[in-house]
Image (spheres, helix red, strand yellow):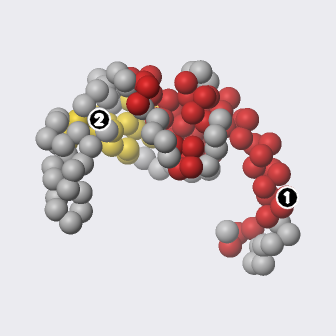
Amino acid sequence: GAPWVELADTMEAYGVELIPFEFTPRSLPGKSTYPKFQDEVCQGIDFAGELSGDSVLLLGIWLMKEMYEQAPDKKSFFNKRFDIWTGYEGFRDEIKNGDSPEDIWARWQEDLLKFKGVRGKYVIYGEKAV
């Protein structure tokens, strides 16, 4: 969440109910001494329902895109570690370009299939163990 996040009403995305709520980050020594947006009222999103399969990642992509679109300062939205955290350098540009979560997900599939091909040589216990 962030002070600028807006979700006016409860809505549904990818089979999950999204419920808005407010919270205020506070300093907690030993845990988070200087939290981002400290002492500012922030808007968050709670999830109700169950996600499975591709919808987990599609919702994550949708949320990232939604937060970027709402961000008042787009230049500082992506920090320098974003590409490392997401594991994919092109994700930042796809979000900036306004690509749909479905289009982004579809582009990832080719690399995913290549990875599974390489990974298959090293799997000891079969697919379900991973």
Tell me the residue at 57%/21% (across/down): 98
Q: Residues within 10 Å of mark 2 (few under 14, many from 20)?
A: some
At label 2, the amino acid type is: Ala
Residue 102 seen: no
Tell me the residue at 46%/35% (across/down): 78
- Image quadrant containing the N terminus: top left
Q: Is residue 22 left or right of residue 65?
A: left
The CA span between labels 1 and 2 is: 40 Å
User: How many numbered discs, if any?
Assistant: 2
Q: Quadrant of residue 97?
A: top right
Question: Reading the chain from its start, which is encountered first: label 1 or label 2?
Answer: 2
Q: Quadrant of residue 21?
A: top left
Q: Residue at the front extreme?
A: 80
Q: Secondary structure at mark 1?
A: helix
Q: Residues within 10 Å of mark 1 (few under 14, many from 20)?
A: few
Tags 1 and 2 in contact by the CB under 8 Å rule? no
Tell me the residue at 17%/35% (across/down): 41
Q: Quadrant of residue 39?
A: top left
- Image quadrant containing the C terminus: bottom right
The spot of residue 6 in percent (x, y) is 31, 25
Q: Which residue is mark 2?
A: 2
The spot of residue 2 in percent (x, y) is 29, 35
Mark on residue 78? Answer: none
Depicted 83 relative to depicted 75: above or below: below
Q: Is residue 11 left or right of residue 129?
A: left
Tell me the residue at 41%/30% (across/down): 76
Q: Which residue is mark 1?
A: 117
At label 1, the amino acid type is: Gly
The spot of residue 61 in percent (x, y) is 54, 37
Residue 60 seen: yes
Q: Secondary structure at mark 2?
A: loop
